[in-house]
Image (cartoon, rainbow, N blue to C red):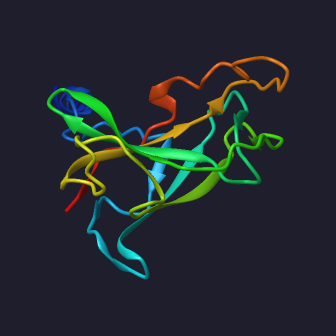
Amino acid sequence: MRAAALSLLVLLAGCTSSDEAPPVREAPIRTDRSAYTVGSGQFGPELKIVSTLRAPADRAVYVVNCNGAISPGLQRRAGDTWVDAWIAATDACLSAPIVIPPGGTHTAELLIRPGAGAVLYPRPNNDTLEPGTYRVVWHGALTSFDANTRPFGPDLPLEQRVSAPFTID
């Protein structure tokens, strides 16, 4: 009887829930830090953010570019929504897409400084980013590519081309 009770106790102990948190799903875009501070560069205030996009495991991603230059941007949290805050300026040429194979990655550096992109938020005509919560968003990341159509292909869904939030001081 005692052995049966002990066996039942062991069995029940195995059925209890674990205090371990479920695994955190990694964001499709990984940044090199979770907090950034604007520093001083050769041409004034400057911020560098390295971001890496991981393609979904089941499909390739086609990144629109001009001689390798892509158009990543920043979105700033404004209340409960995300608004475009900064977008990289690139030349207007069209090169063959950068193809990221299923599950593969591609890394890009965002160099944010006056004159190196378009600051869209905050307005009006502010040439710097306010401190706050941001995320990287990759523009021109497509699920297929055809240079003879406009647009060139369907966008990868937004939730598959943004980073986890981070802060800029």
Of residues 10 and 93, the one nearer the viewer is: 93
Q: Quadrant of residue 48?
A: bottom left
Name above or below for residue 57 compared with residue 112. above
Q: Is residue 164 left or right of residue 66?
A: left
Q: Residue at x 46, y 51 (%)?
A: 30
Which quarter of the image is occupied by the C terminus?
A: bottom left
Q: Quadrant of residue 145?
A: top right
Q: Position of residue 18 (x, y in %)?
A: 22, 36
Q: Position of residue 75 (x, y in %)?
A: 34, 40
Which quarter of the image is occupied by the N terminus?
A: top left
Q: Is residue 143 left or right of residue 23?
A: right
Q: Is residue 57 left or right of residue 22?
A: right
Q: Residue at x 69, y 34 (%)?
A: 61
Name above or below for residue 88 compared with residue 4. below
Q: Position of residue 93 (x, y in %)?
A: 76, 44
Q: Residue at x 51, y 31 (%)?
A: 160
Of residues 21 and 68, the one nearer the viewer is: 68
Q: Position of residue 103 (x, y in %)?
A: 67, 40
Most extreme residue toward the bottom is 42
Name above or below for residue 131 compared with residue 135. below
Of residues 167 and 46, the one nearer the viewer is: 46
Q: Residue at x 18, y 40 (%)?
A: 19
Give the total number of marks visible in the rendering. Answer: 0
Q: Is residue 142 left or right of residue 38?
A: right
